[in-house]
Amino acid sequence: MWAIELKGVSKKYRRHTERPLATTLKSYFLYDLWNQRDESKNVIWALRDIDFKVEKGTTLGIIGRNGSGKSTLLKLISRILKPDAGTVTVNGKVAALIELGAGFHPELTGRENVIINGIILGLTKSEINAKLNEIVDFAGLREYVDDPVRTYSSGMYMRLGFSVAVHVDPEILLIDEVLAVGDAAFTQKCMERMDFFKKADKTIILVSHALETVKNWCEEAVWLDAGHVKMMGKSPDVVEAYTKATL
């Protein structure tokens, strides 16, 4: 059974350019009207014609240079973004750890943000309250849970976000490079929890520049290059091909 399927998926962004204020009819025709006719120059395609499937229970690594479309791909799968073309089909409850502090309100406390994020991810308030102590203890933030999260370090953000994501019992877990900001002990703790998820037949997608982690921990990998799938297959083969191409 497929957990995730992408068919002909493309995503574009509009380039933000400085534009002078039109103060006369002449400047409007020379700049504003002319540029409206050539909007293609202001568009960047982050992903083009992406096609692949992820079988349920697979651990998939996504690799590629910065700007190749990795984070955009995760945001499409998590439905943070919508594709401009193609379809993204996801079968299962998704939890995503894509950006530090995403979904956290800086003026609310860690406790309040856990409750809000849990509700967003589909839990009831009673379910969140039952898991609250476990979430806080896993993150190691009991001393700071009632402080506003604007006072948290990037590592504390990551620990709390990861803890919420893995305790809502998702069927699909999406993780971006955010684990890189954690200390070694917590990163090991995260890997142990993800090993538990693998054994429970969860689907995990990991975006990472840590090629050895992808090679040794993921069964399959996708290599993105300039918004296109350059290669997909067994992770050791994909990592080897990517390494040779980038030397």
Image (spheres, grey):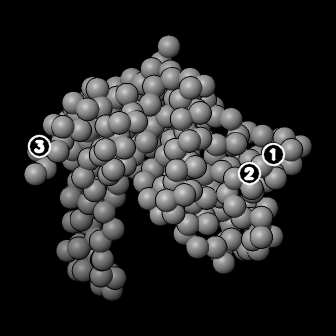
Image location (x, y in percent) of residue 228: 23, 39
Image location (x, y in percent) of residue 184: 49, 59
Disc number placed over residue 135 in the picture, else none: 2
Q: In this view, does 160 lie above or below 217?
A: below
Viewer-proximal residue, 70 or 27? 70
Disc number placed over residue 131 in the picture, else none: 1
Confirm or deny contact between disc 2 and disc 1 (CB under 8 A): yes
Q: Which residue lies furthest to the top in this view?
A: 1
Name the residue at 28% across, 56% down. 66
Q: Distance between the residues labelled 3 and 2?
A: 41 Å
Disc number placed over residue 244 in the picture, else none: 3
Give, as a three-letter code, the residue at label 2: Ile
- Characterize the local packing of mark 2: few (<14), some (14-19) or many (20 or more) Cα atoms within 10 angstroms: many
Give, as a three-letter code, the residue at label 1: Lys
Q: How far apart are marks 3 and 1 (CA)?
A: 45 Å
Name the residue at 68% across, 35% down. 169
Give, as a three-letter code, the residue at label 3: Lys
